[in-house]
């Protein structure tokens, strides 16, 4: 168990009894006096305890960004919140919706499989790598927006709306047919960091109402790394045309029988912040015991 285990247990007991878990004098158990720990229960969602880690907000402050991070321990039924208030605020999912879009495209037969090549539609794109036709196996890691627009159009507005509702994804609002190929980037679809971790828990446990083979296919293209007894799956996202512009890095970590889902969101004030998403999320994953220390990506 990670460093908040003792405190989390106290918070769960306090919440079950109807009391809070505050820092000093609030009627609930006090946080451990270990200096670096300043945790409190934010609320309880069903049977999931939510524990706030105010001390880890310094990770964002030191990077010069505003952000939030949620780690959901599916076995302990505990969520750890860094920047708790923002964790419940919704924002457009941007390219993190490619997780859901891939599943919906496969399930509806809009695409035959990961290796069917979809057209990008021609014309210049903000990212040169997007100016080519790609399969989902290629388009997912490249975040090829026009290819996934084509996938959404093939799914169609009515079927997409039904599946987003079935997934209970965020506010479940994809707007009208006029935005059927960009509702995840400009809105009206929005999702909170907490809701991201809940959707990801269902995905990682193969509990979504789609064929298991399609969920396994998504695992193939979402895998970032494996080793040292863990596997990390993730997807980034960045919505540039909304204000504030959210930058995401979401996914899950499997370590033996343990499964952690996570969602990081920061406000993207400039292009340089894009490079901060994965390192900040990794730092928090290590700090909270979900990733082994020293795990690193490309």
Image: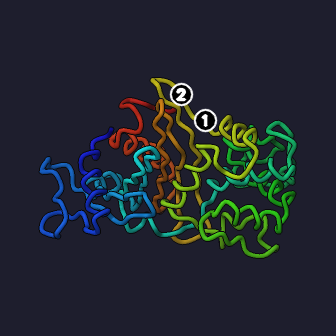
- Residue for point 80% across, 51% down: 105
The residue that mark 2 highlights is 226
Residue 298 seen in render: no
- 241 or 183: nearer the eye? 183
Position of the N terminus, as image quadrant, is top left
- Residue for point 66% across, 69% down: 172
- The spot of residue 128 in percent (x, y) is 73, 46
The residue that mark 1 highlights is 223
- Packing grade of label 1 (10 A; few <14, some 14-19, many >=20) is some
- The spot of residue 53 in percent (x, y) is 29, 55
Name the secondary structure under disc 1: strand
Q: Is residue 22 left or right of residue 196?
A: left
* Outermost top residue: 228
Q: Is residue 5 left or right of residue 47?
A: left
Query: Is the Cβ of the residue at disc 1 closer than 8 Å to that at disc 2?
Result: yes
Residue 250: give its label.
none
Name the secondary structure under disc 2: strand
């Amino acid at each position: 168990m990670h460093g908040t285990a003792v405190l989390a247990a106290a918070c769960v007991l306090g919440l079950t009894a109807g009391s809070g878990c505050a820092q000093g004098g609030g009627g609930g158990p006090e946080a451990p006096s270990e200096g670096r720990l300043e945790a409190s229960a934010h609320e309880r969602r069903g049977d999931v305890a939510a524990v706030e880690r105010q001390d880890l907000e310094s990770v964002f402050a030191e990077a010069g960004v505003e952000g939030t991070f949620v780690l959901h321990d599916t076995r302990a039924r505990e969520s750890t919140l860094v920047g708790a208030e923002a964790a419940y605020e919704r924002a457009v999912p941007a390219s993190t919706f490619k997780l859901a879009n891939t599943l919906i495209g496969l399930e509806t037969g809009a695409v035959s499989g990961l290796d069917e090549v979809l057209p990008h539609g021609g014309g210049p794109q903000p990212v040169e790598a997007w100016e080519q036709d790609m399969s989902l196996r290629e388009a997912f890691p490249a975040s090829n927006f026009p290819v996934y627009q084509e996938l959404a159009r093939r799914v169609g507005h009515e079927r997409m709306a039904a599946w987003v509702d079935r997934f209970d994804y965020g506010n479940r609002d994809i707007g009208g047919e006029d935005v059927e190929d960009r509702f995840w980037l400009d809105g009206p679809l929005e999702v909170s960091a907490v809701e991201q971790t809940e959707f990801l828990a269902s995905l990682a446990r193969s509990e979504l109402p789609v064929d298991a083979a399609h969920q396994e296919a998504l695992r193939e293209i979402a895998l970032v790394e494996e080793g040292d007894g863990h596997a990390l799956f993730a997807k980034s996202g960045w919505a540039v045309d909304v204000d504030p512009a959210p930058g995401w890095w979401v996914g899950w970590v499997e370590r033996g029988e343990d499964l952690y889902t996570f969602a990081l969101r920061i406000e993207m004030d400039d292009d340089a912040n894009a490079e901060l998403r994965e390192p900040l999320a990794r730092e928090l994953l290590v700090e909270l015991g979900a990733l082994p220390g020293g795990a690193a990506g490309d």
